[in-house]
Image: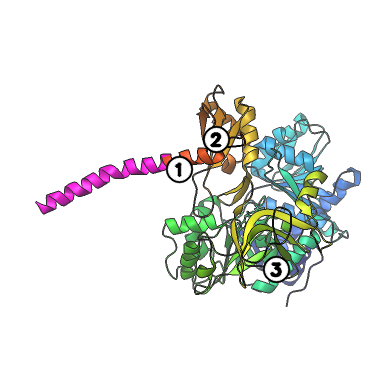
């Protein structure tokens, strides 16, 4: 029986007390026990407490790290300080992270050693002085930064305070646990504010469902800027389990990693399973050690679920669904090979039922309930409904609305669903231009804004292409005639966007196809891509067909 947590750090701290010598984190050849990770986190927390004596600002600390122990220590350190954490990814263009850091208002940032060279650019023209903690860097290695950026304070490993001086400060359940930026349709990423109450409600639901224990070994496939990572870290740590974070090389061959790391809980976007299926990694019985095989973030293709379930015969396989605004995941469907395929629509596994405490409604454009069996937009409310968008009351009011007969706010997911009569909710797509690219949430409007800016074209369109079984694998951009050279546009856009949002190709359109309202007809642009692909496939198969029929003739004669 798991206890309900008051705040996000409590599960980790309880486990560190109970199982100090148990592995908490495995990253490549490095393993940190709960005791070690706690000492490092509390050293950061104590230092932040000391720094905060003379810093005024919101209770937030940014963490710049990617698959590095400093990032995990930093997240726990920020939470133990009583701050919400703001994850930033060093693999994302610095200007983007700088904008997020600035909007978060954070006065301190914890940085992995590999990201230290980015600091000049990250901190440039900051309106306030920041304290940078680089827990893996010798203090002298930061001397150059101290000289160049005298308005900021740089603390290396010897400058951090001892963990014993940590004083737990009380944290309110409605305080922010993390602030996560998601792609925004008008060009600016949106900061979603998630409270401790939101995330501990989510953890209660999944802890009751999966009953993890100290012998479990959780996969950690997600970037820290993707909220699905919260499941891996905090569900594992509240159970005394180990978070197994593959290195980039290990991540490329997930089937081998599942076995070599002895994973018992697998959680990834369906795209990873699609890739594993294509590369024939889903051999029946391949993952005998898995107890749970969980997917979330985009549509889960039925065929892939079937194959993964055969590869992990001892595992319960589930399809989780949820937007960041409803804290990680809020509905779930347990795969049953006898029942689920018949309940699937568009070849995707149903998204199931809301978690206990969450309420779902399916409504039409005027926010009136539609009967079971009809398509509508999915809205949800409950303890996982987050605090809304950072400094954006307008967008918050548009997305969090009241419905007839209910006093609480519901979040409009923008997802089109249908409740099968007497059965689960099924996912039917989006009602806007939000797409999933390899599981990452992308507003095409954000890419279009960048394309307009870097090309000088008044009109730009981004399409998710090529399509995959679960979403899309990439982006193709279109700009108007007379714009910059398309390759230059592509490169400039790439410098401003994270890799999964970068157009693979930019095309110049002489005359935009228009729809009846005079707007650019995106459907027709997509049709062109589909047609082109079909022509290419036909052209590629013709020589083969000719060769085959030639061979047949040769055999016949
Ligand atoms: P994010 O905020 O990045 O978690 O993205 C949330 C969006 O991902 C949802 O609004 C859906 O469009 C999509 N999504 C998440 N889980 C699923 C799922 N199991 N099936 C289909 N779409 C999903």
Q: Position of residue 39 (x, y in %)?
A: 75, 59
Q: Regarding mark 3 in the picture, which secondary structure is present there?
A: loop
Tell me which corner region of the image, top left, top right, bottom left or bottom right, holds residue 229: bottom right
Element at badge 1? helix
Q: Quadrant of residue 515?
A: top right
Count neighbours of disc 3 (C-alpha within 10 A) and say few if under 14, some if 14 to 19, many if 20 or more. many
The residue singled out by tag 2 in the image is: 477
Q: Residue furthest bottom?
A: 1
Q: Nearer the viewer, mark 1 or mark 2?
A: 1
Q: Which stretch is magenta? A: 532-557
Confirm whether the magenta stretch covers residue 276: no
Task: Report crowding for label 1: few under 14, some 14 to 19, many 20 or more residues within 10 A (C-alpha).
Answer: some
Q: CA distance from mark 3 to mark 2?
A: 38 Å
Q: Is the CB of mark 2 within 8 Å of ligand 1?
A: no
Task: Classify 198 as above or below 459.
Answer: below
Q: Which residue is mark 1?
A: 530
| Quadrant, the N terminus | bottom right
Give the spatial CA distance, label 1 vs label 2. 15 Å
The kind of secondary structure the magenta stretch mainly shows is helix
- Can residue 505 be seen by looking at this rendering? yes
Residue at the far left in the pictured view: 557
Ligand 1 located in image quadrant: bottom right
Residue 117 image label: none
Q: Which residue is mark 3?
A: 355
Which mark is first along the chain, 2 or 3? 3
Q: Judge left or right: residue 413 versus residue 539.
A: right
Secondary structure at badge 2 equals strand
Left or right of 398, for residue 220 = left
Q: Earlier in the sequence, mark 1 or mark 3?
A: 3
């Amino acid at each position: 029986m798991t206890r309900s947590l008051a705040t996000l750090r409590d599960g980790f701290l309880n486990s560190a007390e109970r199982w100090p010598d148990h592995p908490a984190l495995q990253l490549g050849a490095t393993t940190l026990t709960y005791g070690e990770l706690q000492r490092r986190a509390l050293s950061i927390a104590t230092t932040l407490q000391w720094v905060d004596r003379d810093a005024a600002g919101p209770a937030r600390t940014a963490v710049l790290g990617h698959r590095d122990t400093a990032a995990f220590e930093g997240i726990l350190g920020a939470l133990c300080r009583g701050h919400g954490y703001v994850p930033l990814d060093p693999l994302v263009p610095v200007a983007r992270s700088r904008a997020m850091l600035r909007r978060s208002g954070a006065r301190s940032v914890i940085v992995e050693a590999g990201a230290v060279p980015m600091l000049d650019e990250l901190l440039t023209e900051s309106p306030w002085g920041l304290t940078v903690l680089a827990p893996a860097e010798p203090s002298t290695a930061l001397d150059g930064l101290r000289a160049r950026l005298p308005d900021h304070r740089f603390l290396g490993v010897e400058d951090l305070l001892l963990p014993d001086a940590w004083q737990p400060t009380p944290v309110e359940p409605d305080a922010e646990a993390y602030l996560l930026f998601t792609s925004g349709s008008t060009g600016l990423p949106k900061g979603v504010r998630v409270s401790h109450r939101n995330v501990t409600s989510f953890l209660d639901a999944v802890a009751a469902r999966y009953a993890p224990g100290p012998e479990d070994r959780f996969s950690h496939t997600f970037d820290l800027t993707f909220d699905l990572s919260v499941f891996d870290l905090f569900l594992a740590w509240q159970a005394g389990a180990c978070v197994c974070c593959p290195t980039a090389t290990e991540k490329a061959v997930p089937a081998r990693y599942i076995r070599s790391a002895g994973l018992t809980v697998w959680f990834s976007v369906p795209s990873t399973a699609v890739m594993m299926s294509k590369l024939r990694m889903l051999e029946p019985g391949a993952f005998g050690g898995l107890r749970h095989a969980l997917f979330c973030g985009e549509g889960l293709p039925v065929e892939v679920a079937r194959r993964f379930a055969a590869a992990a015969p001892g595992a319960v396989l589930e399809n989780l669904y949820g937007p960041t605004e409803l804290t990680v995941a809020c509905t779930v469907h347990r795969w049953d090979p006898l029942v689920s395929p018949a309940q699937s629509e568009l070849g995707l596994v149903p998204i199931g039922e809301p978690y206990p405490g969450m309420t779902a409604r399916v409504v039409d454009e005027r926010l009136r309930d539609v009967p079971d069996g009809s398509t509508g937009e999915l809205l949800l409310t409950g303890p996982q409904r987050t605090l809304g968008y950072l400094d954006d009351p307008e967008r918050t009011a548009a997305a969090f609305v009241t419905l007839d007969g209910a006093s609480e706010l519901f979040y409009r997911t923008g997802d089109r669903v249908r409740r099968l009569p007497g059965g689960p909710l099924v996912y039917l797509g989006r009602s806007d231009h939000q797409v999933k690219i390899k599981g990452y949430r992308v507003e095409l409007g954000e890419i279009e804004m960048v394309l307009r800016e870097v090309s000088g074209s008044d009109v730009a369109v981004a399409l998710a292409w090529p399509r995959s079984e679960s979403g899309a694998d990439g982006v193709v951009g279109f700009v108007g005639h007379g714009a910059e050279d398309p390759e230059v546009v592509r490169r400039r856009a790439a410098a401003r966007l994270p890799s999964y949002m970068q157009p693979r190709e930019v095309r110049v359109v002489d005359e935009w196809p228009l729809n009846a309202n005079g707007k650019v007809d995106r459907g027709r642009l997509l049709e062109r891509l589909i047609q082109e692909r079909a022509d290419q496939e036909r052209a590629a198969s013709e020589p083969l067909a000719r060769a085959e029929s030639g061979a047949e003739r040769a055999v016949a004669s």
